[in-house]
Image (cartoon, rainbow, N blue to C red):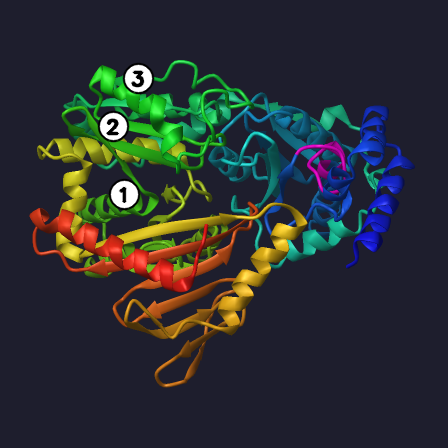
Amino acid sequence: MGNDKLLDQVQEKANQWLQSNIDESSKEQIHKLMESNQDELVEAFYQDLSFGTGGLRGIMGVGSNRVNIYTIGMATQGLANYLKKNFAGKNQIAVAIAHDSRNNSRLFAEQTAAVLSANDIKAYLFDELRPTPELSFAIRHLNCQSGIVITASHNPKEYNGYKVYWEDGGQIIFPHDKNIIKEVQEIKSPDAINFEAQNELIVEIGDTIDEAYLTALQNLSLNPDIIKNQTLKVVYTALHGTGYKLVPKALQLFGFKDIIEVEGQNKPDGNFPTVKSPNPEEHSALEKAIEKAKDSNADIVMATDPDADRVGIAIHMGENEFRLLNGNQTAALLIHYLISQWKEKGLLKGKEYIVKTIVTTELLADIAEKNDVECYDVLTGFKYIADKIRQFEGTKQFIGGGEESYGYLAGEFVRDKDAVMSCALIAEVAAWAASQNKNLWDVLLDIYVEHGVYKEKLISIKREGKKGQEEIEKMISNFRNNPPQKLNGSEVMLIHDYQKQKTIDQLSHLRYEINLPKSNVLQFILKDGSKISIRPSGTEPKIKFYFSVQEQLRSKDDFKAMDSFLEERISRQVNEMGIDA
């Protein structure tokens, strides 16, 4: 589209907003953009903020392509319209609402409750910020038909978002996601939003849900007696998010007494003043917590993101050194512990299973297979793990699941990744290891010796705005149309194209169906066992490249050399694919 035509469309959209019933402050901001910041005007109005398959996420500000009370209101109006159609025979539709610590999150949550109540829907609104997994729990606990959490997870402070859940406590999936999107797209203007709240339909919830959730969580403990006799020191940071509400309580309920908080970081603040990014996947987010751990001679560091669904871990290696674990390593430790303890306690009856995403380490599948536990692969996104739990409810037993992006789950009472639960269980794994005079790294090396070393690396390429979106689309299109034939001397044997739902065998030229929903993901499986996955992020302006390599390990003493060998293999694959972050 030519620049002049695009600008004309942007001007037209901005004028539509100016002519609507939005507040005067928003109108003033639009006028300023029109007068002095054409580039920002384009970014604010060149499209409607996409209500994707999970909801909204974007930069806060005025405009149709920004997160504000009107785009939140339009999404809620569309959702309300769909709920009333889908549950037409129900006397009272109910929705639970939670929010994180981000700037404007409380405002957006209150506006969401107002719009729902204006549409005759009961809104259960948490009295203050709460972790996302507790929202998932509350939906089923209160017999709601849907749920909404206001969060942008671990994105930078400029972002906020809106995630929608269904009555099973999981994020929306097909067909509800597509149907809700259609309803939202029918809301063409802020004037179509009903903001006239019926206050009697807005019900405040809080402590009683906390207590019910924590009671259910405590029942997941597999070795409470071991914890009673441990002296584990845990440093915990909420990174200015919601985790401070429940993570320390969960650890205490499990029996951990020595919980050390990081000064300032357990105070909610949407500006996240002590970190560059509130993302526990990044080393910089854990720096202050690791400093605190060194000062207090702690055993383990835990950091949760703003909505407390992801957790990052660092473990004490001796001599004041701490090692960060990546998401795949933590998932392996957790799944190994859960399966081994279920087996030891005679809880495996032949109907148990775990779930992982297609970009998560195959080590989880190996651990499950060796213990006669089924492992299911699903698309990226915890909503697909939740869907498996829903499918098998009452017929099979979910032990646990995880994804490489630092999200994990055990049990069936929550249907999304849960960092509160994960902190308690990972601390239990550490206590169990300590009872054998080991730390978590020792246990991980044991796993590597038994199953082989799996090394993974994630490369994310960020491209902002409209131009960046086009560049990302071009990148994955190039790999789809011109896939590599060989990398680091190893032939590409299989190409999984989840967009086309086809697997292509490069050697036999046969094609096979992929029995998963369509998704813009490519995977290359090499003869040496390497797995390379490419996917645009669904929540950030990024394209992600996942590299996974593996080799057998004869002994723990060989790990350092093997790790370097596998690192070099990944480096050569990256170079040959021409990836430039």
CA distance separating discs 3 and 2: 10 Å
Foreground disc of the pair 3, 1:
3
Measured as percent of width and height from the top left, residue 212 is found at 44, 28
Number of numbered callouts drawn: 3
Q: Residue at x 28, y 71 (%)?
A: 489
Q: Which residue is mark 3?
A: 260
Q: Is residue 296 left or right of residue 43?
A: left
Mark 1 is on which residue type? Leu
- Could you classify mark 1 by the number of other residues whose Cα lies within 10 Å: few (under 14), some (14-19), or many (20 or more)? many
Query: Quick one: SS at disc 1?
Result: helix
Mark 3 is on which residue type? Ile
Sequence-wise, the earlier of marks 3 and 1 is 3
Q: Are marks 3 and 2 in contact (CB under 8 Å)?
A: no
Q: Residue at x 54, y 47 (%)?
A: 171
Q: Are marks 3 and 1 in contact (CB under 8 Å)?
A: no
Foreground disc of the pair 2, 1:
2
Q: Is residue 308 left or right of residue 82?
A: left
Res 196 label? none
Question: Residue 369 versus residue 508: which sits nearer the camera?
Answer: 508
- Could you classify mark 3 by the number of other residues whose Cα lies within 10 Å: few (under 14), some (14-19), or many (20 or more)? some
Task: Examine the rendered structure and indicate whether residue 192 appears above or below residue 210.
Answer: below
Q: Which residue is mark 1?
A: 334
CA distance separating discs 3 and 1: 22 Å
Query: Quick one: SS at disc 3?
Result: strand
